Amino acid sequence: MIDTHAHIDFKDYNKNREEVIKRAKSKINAIINSGASLGGNRRTLELAEKHKSFIYPSLGFHPVNSSRAEFKVVEEVMDLIEENIEKTVAIGETGMDYHHVKELEGRKKQEKVFKLFIDLAREYELPLIIHARDCEEKAFKLVKKFTSIPEIVFHCYSGSLETAKKIVEENYYLSFSTMLTFSSHHQRLIKEIPLEYILTETDSPYLSPYKGQKNEPLFVEEVITKIAEIKQSNFFEVDQITEKNARQVFNI
Ligand SMILES: [Zn+2]
């Protein structure tokens, strides 16, 4: 099992970070920690250094953060990524979030930053992790032009089935989170998407499958269980294929 998207660097884990990582290590094989801000990227690199061959860094800028950021900060994030390009397994998360960012100015800024990160992924031939919310089709069209990006992942995909099918046709990946355990929309999506294009994630600390309990990478197990149930497959097969997908995408 691999949790391909988590934020273990968030302050939500300041009191029990090492315990959460230890629990994850007992059952799962790797975590891709997603840097969402300048400080987040730094902390992600530290965590990856401390837990080598278990936590892998993906460096980016969350679209809600980028919509509000001064350009100077965007540049600082990009510099940090370039300085650590050998260590990073992917560029992202990056993208656009129309659910949280409604005003035109913020949306324009997100798009501009997103394009800069697309360029980074192209230049360094690294996978791109996209956060797109309520604008999945637009994000898809933006990246579709660039064939030199080795792998593209739509993290926590929540868009339409129609767009999902187009994404898969391009051989891009859709990552399903623990939200799958309680969202009927995601459950309908997973039915139609071949296992070969599916990654699993928790997006910890968000999207907990257990009410009143913080999410953590260990719970990626619940995603696999649910996929197996919906696809009338078995846990072992889903685990094997999704882990193989993740290892191939992130080259780990
Ligand atoms: Zn995230």
Image (cartoon, rainbow, N blue to C red):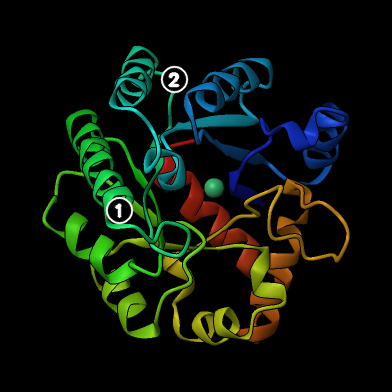
Q: Earlier in the sequence, mark 1 or mark 2?
A: 2
- Image point 18% across, 57% down: which residue? 142
Can you see residue 3? yes
Q: Which mark is residue 107?
A: 1
In the image, residue 179 sits, relative to residue 145, either above or below, namely below
**In this view, which residue lies farthest toward the top?**
83
Determine the residue positioned at 33% across, 49% down: 106
Q: How many marks?
A: 2
Residue 22: where, in percent of width, then height?
A: 84, 33
Relative to 229, is 20 on the left or the right? right
Q: Percent from the top left, x then y, of residue 108?
A: 24, 50
Q: Nearer the viewer, residue 17 or 125?
A: 17
- The crowding category of the residue bearing disc 2, from other C-alpha atoms within 10 Å (few below 14, some 14 to 19, many at least 20), is some
The residue tagged with tag 1: helix, strand or loop? helix
Q: Quadrant of residue 12?
A: top right
Tag 1 and tag 2, C-beta contact below 8 Å:
no
What type is the residue that disc 2 sits on? Lys
| Rendered view: 17 above or below 240 | above
Left or right of residue 137, residue 50 in this image: right
Of residue 142 and residue 97, the one placed in the foreground of this image is: 97
Q: Is mark 1 within 8 Å of ligand 1?
A: no
Label 1 packing within 10 angstroms: few (<14), some (14-19), many (20+): many
- Say what amino acid the circle numbered 1 marks: Arg
Q: Is residue 95 left or right of residue 224?
A: left
Distance from the alpha carbon under mark 1 to that under mark 2 = 30 Å
Helix, strand or loop status at disc 2: loop
Q: Position of residue 129 (x, y in %)?
A: 39, 47
Q: Let me know if residue 234 appears in the view.
A: no
Q: Position of residue 138 (x, y in %)?
A: 24, 66
Residue at numbered disc 2:
87
Q: What residue is rendered at 18% in x and 64% in y?
A: 141
